[in-house]
Image: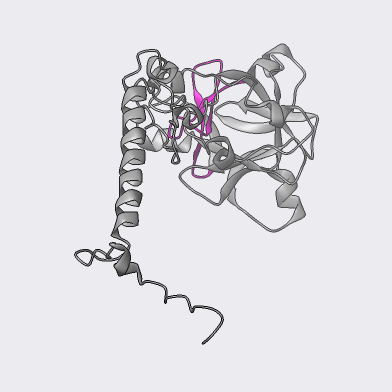
């Protein structure tokens, strides 16, 4: 007979009166708890956003600016940025301005200064009118001096325009012109005399005649400044005969096609200086 009594075998769990629930899938209790926690978190966040949107003291609502996302996040695990407020926006400056604001600006300096100053190269009309609303040349008293004969000026003699030295007061008056906006192109120039006539080309010769009101006269009396190879000087191109420029030949002003020669470039270069009358 053995000295010890063997212990009875351990009882199985179901023998203790507990039995597993076989009516549900294992682990569903944890899923229900996680789902309940997620729903509670979402409800808390939605409630917080609704309260902030209805807050009358929100500075973003009163100022019309965008709301700050840093202060819009409520308690909980997820932060939400409040919607931007678009009320109270205004038209950006510079857009939709009145026509008077665009057209009311005037040139700060004389448009002929680059040609008369003797330094720097005069700008072409294309460069002067590159932006909308650019101020057109205003009426200015000018005399036109030759580059290669600096002691000679455009001078009305009879009904022709010649390149003459100026000595008398009458000659100074006949060598001073009112430079105005081009009759056919406001970005170019027309030259009016003290007698009320205009300089125009006819048969390619520059002369002084009264405006007859015709479109041909306006075109013949309009010249566009182009860049010259001489500093401070311009070349004057006909508006109705592109490629032809005013030049002096035998001291007579005429309209000639452009030539690739130093003589032509010198004969067609002029400086618009202050009126000598």
Report how many numbered discs are placed on residues in the image: 0
Q: Nearer the viewer, residue 214 or 51?
A: 51
Report x, y in % for residue 1. 51, 87
> Can you tell which quarter of the image residue 60 is in?
top left
Assign the C terminus to one quadrant of the image: top right
Extreme residue in the front direction: 1
Quick check: is 103 in the magenta stretch? no
Q: Is residue 238 above or below residue 257?
A: above
Residue drawn 40% across the image and 22% down it: 97
Q: Is residue 214 above or below residue 35?
A: above
Give the image location of residue 233, x and y in percent: 72, 37
User: What residue lies at 68% left-to-right and 37% top-to-bottom?
Assistant: 122
Task: Give the residues in magenta.
Answer: 177-204
Left or right of residue 86: residue 131 = right
Compare residues 185 and 136 and report the one nearer the observer.
136
Along the viewing direction, whichever of 80 and 9 lies nearer the viewer: 9
Q: Residue at 79% x, 31% y: name it.
A: 118
| Residue 201 on the magenta segment | yes
| Display colour scheme | one colour
Q: Is residue 84 visible?
A: yes
State the image coordinates of residue 124 (x, y, percent, origin top left): 61, 41
Height in image: 26 above or below 186?
A: below
- In-front residue for pair 241/40: 40
Q: Would residue 170 be found to the left or right of residue 82 on screen?
A: right
Looking at this rendering, what residue extends furthest in the left direction?
Answer: 23
């Amino acid at each position: 007979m053995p000295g010890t009594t063997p212990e009875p075998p351990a009882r199985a769990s179901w023998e203790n009166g507990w039995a597993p629930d076989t009516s549900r899938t294992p682990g569903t209790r944890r899923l229900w708890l996680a789902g309940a926690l997620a729903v509670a978190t979402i409800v808390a966040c939605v409630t917080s956003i609704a309260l902030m949107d209805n807050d009358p003291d929100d500075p973003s609502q009163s100022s019309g600016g965008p709301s700050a996302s840093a202060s819009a996040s409520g308690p909980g695990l997820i932060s939400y940025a409040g919607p931007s407020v678009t009320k109270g926006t205004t038209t950006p400056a510079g857009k939709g301005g009145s026509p008077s604001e665009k057209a009311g600006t005037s040139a700060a300096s004389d448009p002929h200064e680059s040609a008369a100053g003797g330094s720097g190269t005069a700008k072409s009309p294309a460069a002067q009118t590159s932006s909308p609303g650019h101020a057109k040349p205003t009426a200015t008293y000018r005399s036109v001096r030759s580059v290669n004969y600096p002691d000679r000026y455009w001078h009305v003699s009879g009904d022709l325009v010649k390149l003459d030295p100026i000595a008398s007061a009458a000659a100074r008056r006949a060598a001073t012109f009112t430079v105005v906006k081009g009759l056919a192109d406001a970005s170019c120039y027309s030259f009016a005399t003290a007698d009320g006539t205009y300089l125009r080309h006819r048969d390619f010769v520059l002369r002084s005649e009264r405006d007859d009101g015709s479109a041909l006269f306006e075109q013949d009396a309009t010249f566009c400044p182009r860049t010259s190879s001489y500093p401070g000087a311009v070349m004057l191109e006909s508006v109705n005969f592109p490629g032809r420029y005013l030049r002096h030949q035998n001291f007579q002003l005429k309209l000639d096609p452009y030539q690739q020669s130093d003589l032509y470039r010198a004969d067609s270069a002029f400086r618009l200086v202050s009126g000598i009358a």
